[in-house]
Amino acid sequence: MNANLSEKPFNRILLTGAAGGLGKVLRERIKAWANIVRLSDISNMGEAGEGEEIVQCDLADKSAVLAMMEGVDAVLHFGGISTEADFESIMHANIQGTYNIYEAVHRCGVKRVIFASSNHTLGYYRTTDYVDADMPTRPDGMYGISKCFGESLSRYYYDRFGIETVCIRIGSSFPVPTTRRMLTTYFSYDDLVEMLRCSLFAPRVGHTISFGVSDNPGKWWDNKKAAHLGYKAKDSSSVFAHLFPDTVEYPPADDVTTIYQGGGFLLTTPQYK
Ligand code: NAI
Ligand code: 15L
């Protein structure tokens, strides 16, 4: 981080997945933290604005990722496949891609990474369970498994090389909840940005697993193991409760997508459809 207070705290932050839903939100919101935001995606990101650099590349391209990491002080790794898909595609973008990020981080001396993990590392816990970060992962498909890989990989790079990572197991970060399940998993954009701020600026994070969730009624996840980040949710899905009245069941209580936290992801792994 920059010691000179006239400058922004970081010189250069790399954001992967910059063309995606969250990337577009973060592109604007993280500018306050760095003199330069380097934006990366496999898809088109438009023109670079002031204080922006654009690097269009495939995360699975190791030499391109290494070149992209040059001069970077911190990484927000949001790129990759964000839903269930066939294993080969997941392996390419999420497993090879995340490995390439960490190898480049190590070689370039980057000190801290924020990894966009997912609640689908836990999808086979029941919706009656209350889960904390020390409990075993129970992924609900290849996508969730790839996020478990990213969490283990980052643990290794911390234990072996001291590279700090906060893995944020994001619930559902969208403008509004679009299913009843999302009343429990909702993570407002403001709360996401606040968790990122806490993750970047906490003096020591080591290897932290944090649950990316707003202050929703009936939450499934206990964030006490990430208390050192100092994150406090400001939003709650309660303001959207009227969208999903109790009088309607969607889907019924005995449906697997209601029984397990992963919801609809449980039924989407292509080879088991
Ligand atoms: P998104 O699918 O809108 O964005 C992901 C971006 O990654 C896309 O722009 C895509 O082009 C890029 N990408 C995919 N494969 C790539 C590759 N091989 N090389 C380079 N870029 C590649 O997803 P969203 O919603 O913005 O999520 C961002 C991250 O947060 C993802 O890693 C996702 O798994 C994670 N996350 C998001 C949640 C949410 O509620 N939005 C919930 C849990 C996790
Ligand atoms: C995720 O991991 C996905 O990236 C996102 O698109 C949502 O489906 C979210 O989980 C969710 O569980 O709602």
Image (spheres, helix red, strand yellow):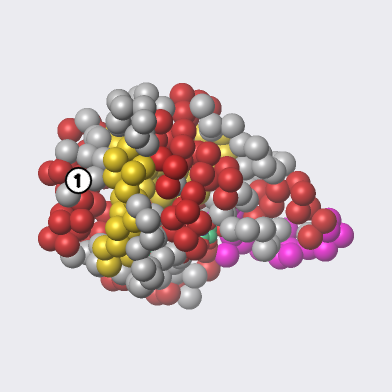
Count neighbours of disc 1 (C-alpha within 10 A) and say few if under 14, some if 14 to 19, many if 20 or more: some
Query: Residue 88, image x and y in percent?
Result: 28, 71
Residue at (37%, 36%) from the top-left corner? 8
Question: Which residue is at the far front?
Answer: 6
Is 208 magenta? The answer is no
From this view, report whether residue 154 is shown above or below residue 244. Answer: above
The image position of residue 153, as x and y in percent, is 26, 45
What residue is drawn where x is 23% and y is 60%? 96
SS category of the residue bearing label 1: loop
Q: Residue at x 59, y 58 (%)?
A: 174
Q: 221 or 104: which is nearer to us?
A: 104
Side of 101 where 247 appears, left or right: right
Can you identify the residue that label 1 sits on?
71
Residue 16 seen in the current view: no
Given residues 57 and 273, the one toward you in this image is 57
Per the rendered image, the range of residues in magenta is 245-264
In terms of secondary structure, what is the magenta stretch mainly?
loop
> Eyeballing the image, is 195 above or below 57?
above
Q: Amino acid at mark 1?
A: Gly
Q: Residue furthest right?
A: 247
Image quarter (top left, top right, bottom left or bottom right) of the N terminus: top left
Inspect this view and state whether residue 63 appears.
yes
